[in-house]
């Protein structure tokens, strides 16, 4: 595909993002781009485009030899998998925003791109308007990239901000995020952290060459956070955000997880509010860089799709450099985290799980224990995810080297 090639697009999905893309493309005449067919699921819905454009037959686009680009913007990961893999096999370039489908099938999707020599671009799948994937792929060299930490889910950030501002209850804020078109069709994917884990899984491939199914990552969302946790945070000068984090450890392996985190005034992520996303990338030469922008919503997501379409015209494709041309890293389970565990009943939290307890407080409604805990303690069982328990990571929460002090052994030394 060259800059002269006309992009003849078959579009799947005409929801918030699909309709925004249609509007933008109809008003941008310079792109040499045309949407020739739109496949939708519900023919009866009223649409902001001529009826002749729409079909409910998904094969009409895939079978059309004149359509050279498939844009997949559905909310259904199963349908998206069929559409994207079939389109690649038929030699069509693909742009997709379906993070769940991409994260769960990335290895196969990379193979298909190589086998059929066609690109699949998905900048819109992570952080909508912020160009994170292409920067990780092109700009940051593997050895220099220390860490990525980010607020990558707009809905949960919107909910946490509205609650912290005292404007909404959790239920009201979630309903507002849904009404604004930020939330997933199944909003449990947002609030339970799955969406953020999907995005982290995609980042890992482009940042460190790690192919990790999202279910291999440690993650949780915001559903278990308690009102008392915000008060606890405020007393310490923090706010709470859902943060996706990956850090290269000294042994070359990568620590990666998605967990609620305390962020203080000095942290750039503290400034990220409402549906905005923010990503801080740390590398040895550039030090810290901060990307911030709208992470959800029709036009911000359409802007990333537009950028991918434009990139297709100069034959851009992901090379997966860290995966293919250098030694890819692997995930680590051998590190500690400094966390606060918040809970209402003592039987839910066994203090022996901590390598060190640093602070303990309790009120009528809630107890908070701060301490150092080995990552494998969290990986091996779900005690910290049960209803009534929440876990919040402290800033700079990864502790690589820690010598647990066995107090009891020391106290009872015989003399
Ligand atoms: N539901 C997602 C979010 C949409 O809230 O971030 C953008 O990926």
Image: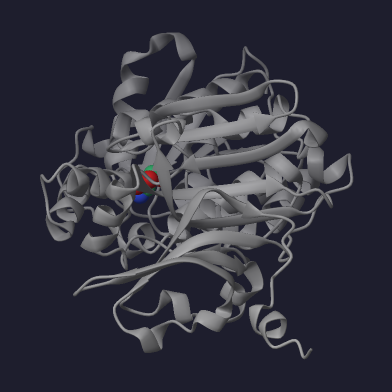
Query: Is 200 placed above or below 124 here?
Result: below
Instruction: Decide which of 195, 145 is in the foreground and name it.
Output: 145
Residue farthest toward the front in the current orientation of the protein? 415
Q: How is the image coloured?
A: one colour
Q: On the rendered image, what quadrant is the N terminus found in?
A: top right
Quadrant into which the C terminus falls: bottom right
Q: Quadrant of residue 92?
A: top right
In percent of width and height, residue 234 lies at 28, 47
**Name of the residue lying farthest toward the top:** 30
Q: Position of residue 400 (x, y in %)?
A: 72, 55
The one of 274 and 13 positioned closer to us in this rendering: 274
The one nearer the camera, 228 or 319, is 228
Q: Is residue 384 left or right of residue 177?
A: right
In the displayed structure, 165 sits above or below 214; it is: above
How many numbered marks appear?
0
Relative image position of residue 155 (x, y in whole percent)? 30, 48
Classify residue 138 by image quadrant.
top right
327 relative to 406 in the view: left or right: right
Residue 382 in sight: yes
Mark yes or no: residue 39 visible: no
């Amino acid at each position: 595909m060259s800059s002269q090639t006309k992009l003849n697009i078959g579009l799947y999905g005409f929801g918030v993002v699909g309709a925004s893309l249609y509007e933008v493309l109809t008003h941008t005449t310079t792109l040499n781009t045309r949407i020739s067919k739109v496949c939708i699921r519900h023919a009866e819905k009223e649409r902001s485009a001529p009826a002749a454009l729409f079909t409910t037959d998904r094969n009409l686009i895939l079978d059309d030899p004149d359509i050279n680009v498939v844009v997949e913007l559905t909310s259904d990961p199963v349908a998206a998998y069929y559409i994207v893999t079939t389109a690649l096999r038929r030699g069509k370039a693909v742009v997709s925003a379906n993070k769940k489908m991409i994260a769960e099938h990335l290895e196969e999707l990379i193979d298909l791109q190589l086998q059929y020599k066609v690109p699949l671009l998905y900048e819109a799948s992570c952080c909508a308007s912020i160009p994170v994937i292409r920067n990780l792929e092109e700009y940051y060299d593997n050895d220099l990239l220390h860490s990525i930490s980010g607020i990558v889910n707009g809905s949960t950030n919107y909910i946490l901000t509205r609650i912290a501002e005292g404007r909404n209850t959790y239920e009201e804020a979630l309903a507002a995020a849904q009404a604004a078109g930020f939330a997933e069709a199944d909003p449990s994917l947002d609030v339970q952290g799955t969406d953020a884990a999907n995005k982290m899984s995609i980042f890992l491939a482009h940042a460190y060459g790690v192919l990790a199914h999202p279910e291999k990552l440690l993650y949780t969302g915001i559903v278990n956070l308690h009102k008392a946790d915000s008060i606890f945070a405020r007393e310490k000068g923090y706010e709470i955000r859902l943060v996706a984090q990956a850090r290269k450890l000294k042994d070359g392996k990568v620590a990666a997880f998605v967990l609620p985190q305390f962020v203080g005034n000095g942290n750039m992520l503290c400034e990220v509010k409402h549906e905005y996303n923010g990503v801080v990338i740390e590398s040895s030469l550039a030090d810290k860089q901060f990307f911030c922008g709208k992470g959800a919503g029709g036009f911000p997501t359409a802007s990333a799709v537009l950028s991918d379409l434009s990139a297709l015209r100069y034959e851009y494709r992901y090379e997966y450099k860290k995966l293919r041309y250098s030694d890819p890293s692997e995930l680590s389970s051998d590190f500690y985290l400094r966390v606060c565990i918040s809970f209402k009943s003592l039987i839910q939290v066994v203090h022996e799980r901590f390598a060190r307890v640093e602070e303990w407080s309790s009120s009528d409604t809630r107890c908070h224990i701060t301490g150092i805990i080995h990552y494998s303690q969290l990986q091996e069982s779900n005690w910290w995810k049960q209803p009534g328990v929440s876990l919040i990571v402290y800033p700079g929460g990864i502790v690589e080297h820690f010598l647990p002090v066995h107090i009891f052994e020391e106290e009872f030394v015989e003399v």
